[in-house]
Amino acid sequence: MRNLPSFAGELPVSTLAEEILTEGDGQIKMLITNSGNPVISTPNGHKMDKALSTLDYMVAIDFYINESSRHAHIILPPTSSLERPHYNLAFHTLAVQNTAKYSEALFIPEKNARSDMQIYIELWSRLQPAGLVNRVKTWLTKRAIYKKAEAGIVDMGLKKGPYENLDLSQLKQSVHGVDLGALQPCMPGRLFTADKQIHLFPQEIKKDMARMEAEFNCTIKKDVQFNMLLIGRRDPRTNNSWMHNSYRMVKGKDRCIAFVHTKDAKLHKLQDGDIIRVISHTGELSIPVAVTENIKVGVVSIPHGWGHVFKDTQLSIANKHAGVNINILMDENAVDELSGNAVLAGVAISIEKLPQNG
């Protein structure tokens, strides 16, 4: 709808709601979400909530009936992390030592339970073209994949790797994992650039510098009404909305609170625990305050991922610790011009103290 660019192979979620709501060629009418909660995690969540309710069909791969998956026509819950084996790939990219570890499943899943891989393969197979030849090819592919399964794929990858005699059977015998020694150089072989150089200053960014400098150097007219800036915050115990349905993560003091600088608190006659109304161009919310010196004057910080207020979800613990959804204050039309990424920090807001009775 807005001709926004893709970035790193991903389309900007800030335009998803209007791609669903706007009729015409290319309108999105079906959607699959995988462990996602766009009603909570995207700008202008109210609009996203409305958009999901209009879909012809929605599939959710998720454990929970949450704010987004409640719109799904079918929910496909995968096996839990304790019902399937695990070989870590993601965090090896952050490692400081070469290691390998394989963890067996602790529990046998129920008969009709499916792992993520099985769900993906089944969805893929149902989308293949009709016809006898295609059905046979699909069946043979599925059989080959299921024969290997997750463990077989890991074993094949280990055997093709640089470490001799390392395979799955060895990892299974080493319950605490295997130390493979220091990290090994892999440059420039792992670079896909034609000149085998790391391009720190790509042409796309270089061409965009003039626009960026113009925006930074322009004289900003201070908005009389929205005279403060809003930023997000990550709390280690409640980093993602999934964690809000775990009592161990949300117990104790309230974690969905707004940080306000001491000087701003004095100006608005605020104390710890007072309730403020936060207002932006797109919405407003009410939230308790924590007064602190650890933030800039004129800035308010609210953590993301909260706002479990919908009655037709099945998040009993999260609903008791609902918090507020910071993204209702975000404008989905405010994006970075180069990447199409939503602007989620430095949002213009105003605050006002609410009476004790709310």
Image (cartoon, grey):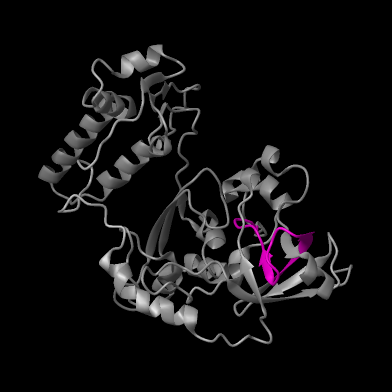
Q: Residue furthest top?
A: 173
Q: Is residue 1 visible?
A: no
Please determine whether, in this image, residue 164 is positioned above or below residue 351. above
Screen quadrant of the N terminus? bottom left
Residue 249: give x, y in percent of width and height: 67, 41
Of residue 226 and residue 186, the one placed in the foreground of this image is 186
Residue 285: give x, y in percent of width and height: 70, 69
Q: Is residue 356 visible?
A: yes
Of residue 187 and residue 102, the one placed in the foreground of this image is 187
Screen quadrant of the C terminus? bottom right
Residue 93: give x, y in percent of width and height: 38, 39
Q: Residue at x 69, y 45 (%)?
A: 317
Q: Quadrant of residue 266?
A: bottom right
Q: Which residues are magenta?
A: 285-307
Q: Residue at x 32, y 46 (%)?
A: 123
Q: Residue at x 32, y 76 (%)?
A: 3
Side of 155 relative to 225 (left or right)? left
Q: Residue furthest right?
A: 356
Residue 292 is inside the magenta segment: yes
Please determine whether, in this image, residue 264 is positioned above or below residue 68. below
Q: Quadrant of residue 202?
A: bottom left
Of residue 185 and residue 156, the one placed in the foreground of this image is 185
